[in-house]
Image (spheres, rainbow, N blue to C red):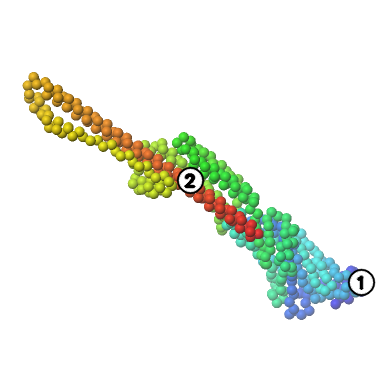
Amino acid sequence: MLNCSSPDTLSLLAALQPVFKLNPIRPVMNLSTTTNVSVSFIMIGILGVDEKAQVLTTYIWQSMTWRNEFTTWDVEECGTPWISVQRKLLWVPDMVINEFMGKNSAPFAPYSYLAYDGMVYDAQPVRVVSSCRLDIYLFPFDIQNCSLSYNSYLHGLKAIEPSFGIPVELMFKLSKEVMATMAAAYLSSPQVTVKRRATLYVVNILIPSCFLVTVDLFSFMLPPKKVDRSLFKMTLILGYTVFLLMMNDLLPITGDVIPLLNVFLSLCLGLMVASLLETILITNLICGSAHYSPVPRWIRVLVLHILGRLVRLPPKPRDKKDTVFRNPAVPEFEMKVPPPVAKWSEAPEEKEPLNDYEALQELWSLGRDLQAVRLQVEQQLTGSRSTEEWIQVGLIIDRLLFIVYILFLTVSFITIIIIWVNSYNNL
């Protein structure tokens, strides 16, 4: 118990001078006594999150309370229940944040409060640069759990026992009232849980990306025979690439985990490139399939019969070939006609058989010409049928990619909405 000569601050300060000389040692009468240090802090702001360096930068107001057994006095005798003294004159516990990775650049608070019962109240601002394993797989709907664990480097638990000074719920309430940042945060002993506000990324990245991919989806409705669909798709890919370059600063950069958003953007770009290649293939089949060989059997079975029925484009039924029937009277007529040698051996006076033979020769010549025309027509029909099959293959591939596009967009939209809703429910 300190003795004050008069009930004023100066006499109390004079009585504390011997105590100030004891600041190098832990303030207990018996070294076996444990000093209980109550630690609490209020989150003032989240200054930054570095996904690449796995670092969380926060600004907190840290408070510590402990009891100094050397400093007790009577309030009536000394005239005041508390006094502020320089922090360097008192013993201060070496409580540090284990995850601290930088120097505290916050302003230094040089004073502490000392109460009549020996309780010391010490508070100071701390700019915490702490290591935190950031899981950005669900970016921008991610929730990060970063630990802020307090510990004494020199003293063990028998000498210093740390504890939370106020309930965690109260710390969260006070932090929420003074929070001055674009991110929401709440405290859970001994962690700081940070939730990213995803509205900025949804508006600037997800919605424009979905719009461009949807426009590319509707480009499948353009007829490739009459419209240069490939030029339209190339313009979309160019615009999407410029958009990704502009939004590159908003995307997280880390080598540990690939964010789901980056995978979505890469798949969108990949589908747009695939649709351009597919459009080039269809245009080539439409314009140059007349010079192609017939469709191979495995392509006809796999694409025309299997995939064609799957996408509701079954192969067209083939027209039956025109069958050429020989006149049954021709053999009999040929049997009745004598051979050419016999005709020439007859007398010149027999004019009628000679005229019949000349007519027969003309019919034979006309038959050969008709046979050649028939073969040429069959070749033309076969080539036209091959061209139709190649064009049908292109249309089936076009329809299949269109269906894949619809499934991808549907699954992506549903997944984004579910993750977004879950992130709000976890706040």
At numbered mark 2, what does the secondary structure look like: helix, strand or loop?
helix
Dots 1, 2 in contact, CB < 8 A: no
Q: Which of these two is toward me, 121 or 144?
A: 144
The answer, for residue 262, to whether it is visible in the render is: no
In the image, taking residue 220 as reference, residue 92 lies left or right, namely right
Whether 296 is drawn above or below 127: the answer is above
Whether 213 is drawn above or below 79: the answer is above
Q: Where does the N terminus fall, quadrant-wise?
A: bottom right
Task: Estimate the x, y position of residue 157 in percent, counting from the top left.
Answer: 69, 75
How far is the residue under mark 1 from the one under mark 2? 90 Å
Name the residue located 79 percent from the left edge and 74 percent from the top edge. 68
Q: Which residue is mark 2?
A: 402
Name the residue located 40 percent from the left edge and 46 percent from the top edge. 308
The answer, for residue 391, to whether it is visible in the render is: yes
Count neighbours of disc 1 (C-alpha within 10 A) and say few if under 14, some if 14 to 19, many if 20 or more. some
In the image, taking residue 73 as reference, residue 298 lies left or right, namely left
